[in-house]
Amino acid sequence: MTMNPQLARRLRKIRAFLLDVDGVLTDASIKITSDGIQDKVVNVMDAESILAAQAIGVQFGLITSSASDVVLKRAEELNITDIYRGSYDKGDAYAEFKHVYEFTDEQVAYMGDGILDLSVLKQVGFAATPSDAHPSARMAAHFVSRHRGGYGAVREVLTMLVQAQREEEF
């Protein structure tokens, strides 16, 4: 796949990738059983891409307004230890993450889909959204995936990231 050179330059600088959960790793649906237990559906291909990016040294974190324990379980499966749950002010969570790891904005990528994601999308070095993101989020993004949230949007972006970073090695 031929990549836009400007996007490739941005992606080569990325050392950390933060993700929203609902609407990005999931299709934003929440299944609730008669017992009140919540469940979410995720895309296995997205998970494989996260593991591939981790293998080349990209650090991951989750910033989500959800307080669901399902988020913790998925993060554990993906070896993601930086989890900001119940974050309605995602800009604060982003600032904390950057401070802890001493990343600059240009070293961080973020994928979000909603109005609550705007503060982070507007700061990071690489901002991405799924195709079905809120119009204001899409406008703030450097890249809009061809895929909807929960249906391979994360995979598409991480494939580009890994490709750009590998090209840097040569």
Image (cartoon, rainbow, N blue to C red):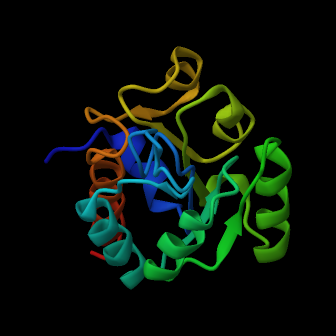
The residue closer to the viewer here, 95 or 33, is 33
Residue at the extreme top of the image, as rendered: 135
Q: Is residue 160 left or right of residue 33?
A: left
Q: Residue at x 39, y 25 (%)?
A: 132
Q: Is residue 103 above or below residue 87?
A: below
Residue 147, image x and y in percent? 27, 36
In the figure, residue 104 lies in which quadrant? bottom right
Q: Residue at x 37, y 84 (%)?
A: 55
In the figure, residue 149 lies in which quadrant? top left
Q: Is residue 2 left or right of residue 103?
A: left
Q: Is residue 108 left or right of residue 42?
A: right
Q: Residue at x 44, y 80 (%)?
A: 77
Count up the numbered dots: 0
In the figure, residue 98 lies in which quadrant? bottom right
The residue closer to the viewer here, 168 or 39, is 39
Residue at the extreme left of the image, as rendered: 1
The quarter of the image holding the C terminus is bottom left
Q: Is residue 130 above or below residue 158?
A: above
Residue 156, image x and y in percent? 27, 49
Residue 154, image x and y in percent? 36, 51
Q: Residue at x 72, y 59 (%)?
A: 85
Residue 107, image x and y in percent? 62, 60
